[in-house]
Structures are given as structure tokens and as C-alpha cells.
Image: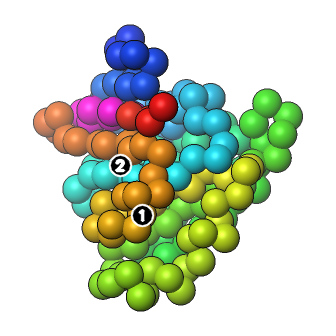
Amino acid sequence: MSKVAPPAEGRTHQFTTHSGADTIEVGRKLARLLKPPQLLLLRGDLGTGKTTLVKGIAQALDAAEPDEVTSPTFTLLHEYDGALDGRPVKLFHLDVYRLEGERQLETLGLDELLTPDALVLVEWGEKFKSIRKKSTGEIAITSAGGDARKITVTTKD
């Protein structure tokens, strides 16, 4: 099961998972920590569990079941409607890996997604200066050997 490290200055949370199910559970916990509006970079190598983490977040928001959440690698954007503390929440999951420049990024309408009720999670967003500037933090996932993952969530004040 996952372990939660105490937050440093209330802005950083660390988790260690040992399976995909653990990663989904951490996603469920993270949903309670994320307050819209948020735009978070989802950082991690291919296969580290970025989409698996989003499965847990979507489930906690009653936006989708884990098996309904897939990587938006080819569609670029998936949108889910959910709720947090009784208030509607829009969960946007983007994957900009295949985009090659700011001009292509503009076609996604990222600014229009950033509404007061939105949680926007962007895989590979660190590639783009405009996304880095808009981000309110990041979720970094690194392999810790085998199926183990280290998940670090950092949000800006």
C-alpha cells in the first residue's frame, strides 16, 4: 500500500506505490488535495503510471471508473465531468507528447479549459514554456524499481 510523507510547508506530498492498484489509490487521495482551478504538469517517463494516477483522480471525483480512463496520446484531450465536495468539477487530461510547437498547442484551446471549476492534468506539458508558466504545480512519477513508483506532488502557493 502507499505511504504518505508529511507535507513540506503544506506544498509537497510524497507517495510510494508498489502496484497499479496502489497508484490508483494515490490518485483517489490526490483528488482531495487538488482544489480547482489547477493546471498540473504530469511528469514521468513512458510507462511510469501517469494515466493510472489519473484513473484514481477521475474515480474519486465520480467522473469515470478506472477502466474508462485511457491515455489521450492520440486524441490529445479527454474531458470528464465530476464533483468535489458537492461542487461540479471538470477534469481535463491532456497528452501533448506528439505536439511539436506552441502553434500546435494553441489549437487545443488550453486557456478556455482553465475555468474556475477545472482540474487540468497535462502529460508532457514541461515541453512547452506556455504550459509551464500557467501551471500551478506538478505531479512527478519516477520508477523506484520493479512496479514501485515514487509520486511527488508539488503545488505553488
Q: Give the range drawn in magenta.
A: 148-153
Which residue in the protein does label 2 denote? 49
Cα–Cα gap, marks 2 and 1: 21 Å
Magenta-drawn stretch contains 151: yes
The percent position of residue 53, horizontal first and vertical second, equals: 46, 44
Task: Classify mark 1: helix, strand or loop.
Answer: helix
Rendered position, 133 above or below 33:
below
Q: Is residue 56 left or right of residue 36?
A: left
The percent position of residue 128, horizontal first and vertical second, equals: 33, 69
- Residue 100 visible in the picture: yes
Magenta-drawn stretch contains 40: no
User: For residue 33, which quarter of the picture?
Assistant: top right
Mark 1 or mark 2, which is nearer the start of the sequence? Answer: 2
The percent position of residue 44, horizontal first and vertical second, equals: 27, 52
Tell me which residue sits at (70%, 41%) in the image: 61
Which residue in the protein does label 1 denote? 131
